[in-house]
């Protein structure tokens, strides 16, 4: 078995993979595969109901919110949020904290005006801007809770006078959040919730119907809510595996318990990066992500041999994104702390070898 630090699609719990594999052959002993049953069947309806119920339970989703499973990934939500929420000629506010935030605001420009309230672009997104004012005349304020590529994470959310829209693709279910602080939350499943193909959307019902736009059915949150995520054929298998993963999370003690594990994993890894003279962190300490840990080497020539050592130890997926370089260790919910210790051992072993050679 490998130690999977990949950024996405990311690691899934081994138990979940076994259950999913069994469901592909014979779902709950009904003699049919999850891949070949009607989405209107009692079996699938109960899977979808259970997935929605688990989302509500694990995140404490209050009354007045709808939970949807959609397709098209977070990138489709970049467009659907403004399509549904931004009136013709209106304005939306965005916090630009990375490539994903930038892609989100580019889509909003197809529908109206965009105000970038703050950006950390000038520093290649190594921190989260904190000194800004949210304009009250904007339709919504869009943020990215965790910047998967740069390794920064919002450790606190602002109080917003307008509905807050949040891309939580890479840290949903990793920590406690107060859903009531948000008008719309969306997340592609493939980082921390399940396989690619399903997108989770949590929406406050009363923010809808205010844009005055005519919206085609598939792109309209209202149609999706009325259809219970089944206006058309949903991504059945991705929803099934997401449900299994959420069930696994519940059995581990839920979001509060996994948050403590995530904090512990991040702490030991950042401690090693700070301590080990060969490695250095890239992000502002107060904004360090508990999901994607980015670091580089003091001597870039060491990066290739270190990567090779990692490969030899079964560590995969830690090469950094091309826009940051170096390394990115994604330590999503399903990654055990034992894998983090394997990485730390590799860092220490590499440092010892290198110092002896010098
Ligand atoms: C991966 C990612 C995306 C893109 O998700 P898709 O489902 O591939 O569209 C968007 N935002 C964030 C924060 C991500 O990590």
Image: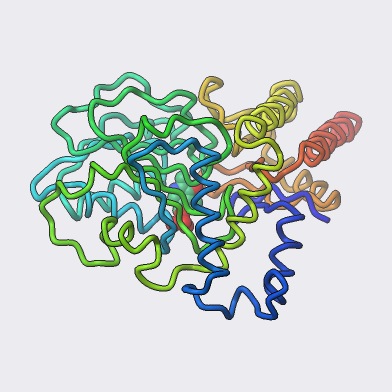
- Locate residue 101: give its quadrant: top left
Answer yes or no: is residue 41 visible.
Answer: yes
Give above or below for 308 relative to 121.
below
Seen at 35% across and 23% down, the residue is 158
Residue 327 found in image quarter = top right
Residue 46 horizontal side relative to residue 162, left or right: right
Against 35, is 165 above or below?
above
Residue at left offset 76%, top offset 55%: 15
Please count the marks in the image.
0
Residue 68: image x %, image y %?
41, 54
Please indicate, yes or no, whether residue 298 appears anywhere in the rendered image: no
Q: Which residue occupies the foreground of this view, 111 or 69?
A: 69
* x and y percentages locating residue 5 in the rendered image: 69, 47
Q: Is residue 181 above or below residue 220?
A: above
Point out residue 230 in the picture as x, y percentages from the top left corner.
40, 67
Q: Quadrant of the N terminus?
A: bottom right
Of residues 45 and 23, the one nearer the viewer is: 45
In the image: residue 276, left or right of residue 189: right
Left or right: residue 53 versus residue 163 is right
Q: Position of residue 231 (x, y in %)?
A: 35, 68
Q: How is the image coloured?
A: rainbow
For this orientation, the residue located farthest to the left is 89
The residue sitting at 55% across, 47% down in the picture is 54
């Amino acid at each position: 078995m490998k130690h999977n630090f990949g950024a996405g699609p990311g690691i899934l719990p081994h138990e979940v993979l076994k259950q999913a594999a069994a469901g592909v052959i014979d779902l709950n002993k009904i003699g049919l595969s999850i891949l070949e049953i009607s989405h209107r069947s009692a079996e699938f309806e109960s899977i979808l109901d259970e997935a929605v119920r688990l989302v509500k339970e694990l995140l404490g989703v209050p009354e007045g919110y709808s939970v949807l499973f959609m397709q098209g990934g977070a990138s489709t939500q970049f467009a659907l949020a403004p399509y549904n929420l931004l009136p013709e000629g209106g304005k939306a506010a965005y916090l630009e904290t990375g490539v994903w935030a930038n892609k989100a605001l580019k889509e909003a420009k197809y529908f109206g005006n965009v105000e970038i309230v703050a950006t950390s672009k000038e520093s290649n997104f190594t921190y989260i801007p904190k000194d800004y004012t949210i304009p009250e005349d904007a339709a919504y304020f869009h943020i990215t809770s965790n910047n998967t590529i740069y390794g920064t994470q919002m450790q606190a959310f602002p109080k917003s006078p307008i509905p807050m829209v949040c891309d939580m693709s890479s840290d949903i279910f990793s920590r406690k959040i107060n859903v009531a602080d948000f008008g719309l939350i969306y997340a592609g499943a493939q980082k921390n919730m399940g396989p690619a193909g399903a997108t989770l959307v949590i929406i406050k019902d009363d923010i809808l119907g205010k844009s005055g736009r005519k919206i085609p059915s598939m792109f309209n949150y209202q149609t999706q809510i009325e259809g219970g995520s089944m206006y058309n054929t949903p991504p059945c298998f991705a929803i099934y595996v997401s449900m299994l993963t959420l069930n696994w999370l519940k059995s581990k003690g839920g979001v509060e318990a996994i948050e403590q594990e995530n904090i512990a994993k991040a702490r030991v890894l950042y401690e090693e990066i700070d301590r080990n003279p060969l490695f250095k962190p890239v992000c502002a300490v107060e904004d360090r992500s508990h999901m994607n840990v980015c670091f580089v080497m003091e001597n870039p020539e060491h990066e290739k041999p270190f990567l090779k050592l990692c490969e030899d130890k079964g560590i995969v997926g830690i090469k950094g994104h091309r826009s940051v370089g170096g390394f990115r260790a994604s330590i999503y919910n399903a990654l055990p702390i034992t894998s983090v210790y394997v990485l730390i051992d590799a860092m220490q072993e590499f440092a010892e070898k290198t110092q002896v050679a010098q």
